[in-house]
Image: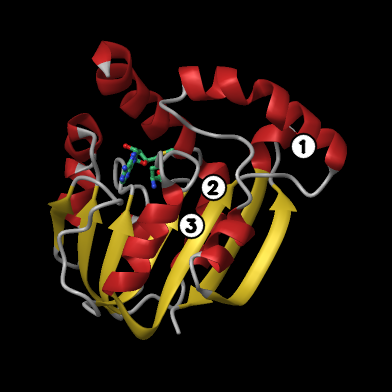
Amino acid sequence: MGIYNDQIVPRIVDVACGSKLNNPQRRRVCAGLQGRVLEIGFGSGLNVPFYPAAVQSISAVEPADLGWKLAAKRVAKATVPIERSGLDGRALPFDDNFFDAALSTWTMCTIPDIATALAEVRRVLVPGGTLHFVEHGLAPDSKVQLWQHRLNPIQKALAGGCHLNRDIRGLVETAGFEIRDIDVFYEDGPKFLTALTLGVAVSP
Ligand SMILES: C[S@@+](CC[C@H](N)C(=O)[O-])C[C@H]1O[C@@H](n2cnc3c(N)ncnc32)[C@H](O)[C@@H]1O
């Protein structure tokens, strides 16, 4: 989709998502990951330092070549094998029931047809497998929501298709996952952008 999305957005994502402010959320969301793990929207590998020792391998799904390139230094330092195994969360090149866990951080906002991607994640998880997620999305307060709906078209255009107003809990539940833990809160920063949903959901 042009030079801006291919060459600029992955660099913005690397810097913006790489803020140290996000590290506590990365640590929390990665806790409990184990076995074979699928990571959708791997980006520049900002979760790599937070994978627990129980993780055996990471299959990274990431469409942006530049994101993967920016991840190289983190991938090289990783203590688990990481392979770029797919390009699109909506069409995962894996057998059913393949992964023990899946990870999505600040990614459900961006995948165009997120319902299809979540159905794919469910398909490739073993029964009882867990989806760990931290996402920005629809705020709990109606005044903030109003601004999220207003600003959404600008955000989509400037930030590689990122939506401000997706209902993360609703999307995860509609895909058939059972919520095990969930926390909805504001990080520091503008509320329309920092309403986070962090949780773990189980594939039944
Ligand atoms: C805001 S970034 C988050 C990156 C990373 N997860 C992080 O926490 O830093 C969203 C990521 O989703 C990726 N993405 C966009 N469309 C996708 C798709 N269809 N399937 C998988 N990932 C996608 C983007 O390339 C980008 O790396």
Relative to residue 162, is residue 114 depicted above or below? below
**Label 1 element class:** helix
Residue 173 in view of the camera = yes
Q: Position of residue 125 (x, y in %)?
A: 31, 76
CA gap, disc 3 and disc 2: 6 Å
CB within 8 Å, label 3 to label 2: yes
Query: Toward which corner of the image does residue 129 lie, by quadrant?
Result: bottom left
**Label 3 element class:** helix
Q: Which residue is mark 1?
A: 145
Crowd rating for badge 1 (residues with CA inside 10 Å; few <14, some 14–19, many 20+):
some
Q: Residue at x 23, y 53 (%)?
A: 91
Q: Position of residue 141 (x, y in %)?
A: 84, 44
Which residue type carries mark 3?
Answer: Arg
Q: Which residue is mark 2?
A: 22
Q: Quadrant of ligand 1?
A: top left
The front one of 32 and 95 is 95
Q: Residue at x 71, y 40 (%)?
A: 188
Q: Is mark 2 within 8 Å of ligand 1?
A: yes
Relative to residue 69, is residue 138 depicted above or below? below
Q: Position of residue 64 (x, y in %)?
A: 23, 34
In the image, is 181 to the left or to the right of 10?
A: right
Q: Is mark 1 within 8 Å of ligand 1?
A: no
Residue 51 in view of the camera = no
**Label 2 element class:** helix
The image's mark for residue 186 is: none
The front one of 25 and 178 is 178
Q: Which residue is mark 3?
A: 26
Which residue type carries mark 1?
Answer: Gln
Relative to residue 19, is residue 24 depicted above or below? below
Q: Residue at x 17, y 51 (%)?
A: 86
Q: Is mark 3 within 8 Å of ligand 1?
A: yes
CA gap, disc 1 and disc 3: 25 Å
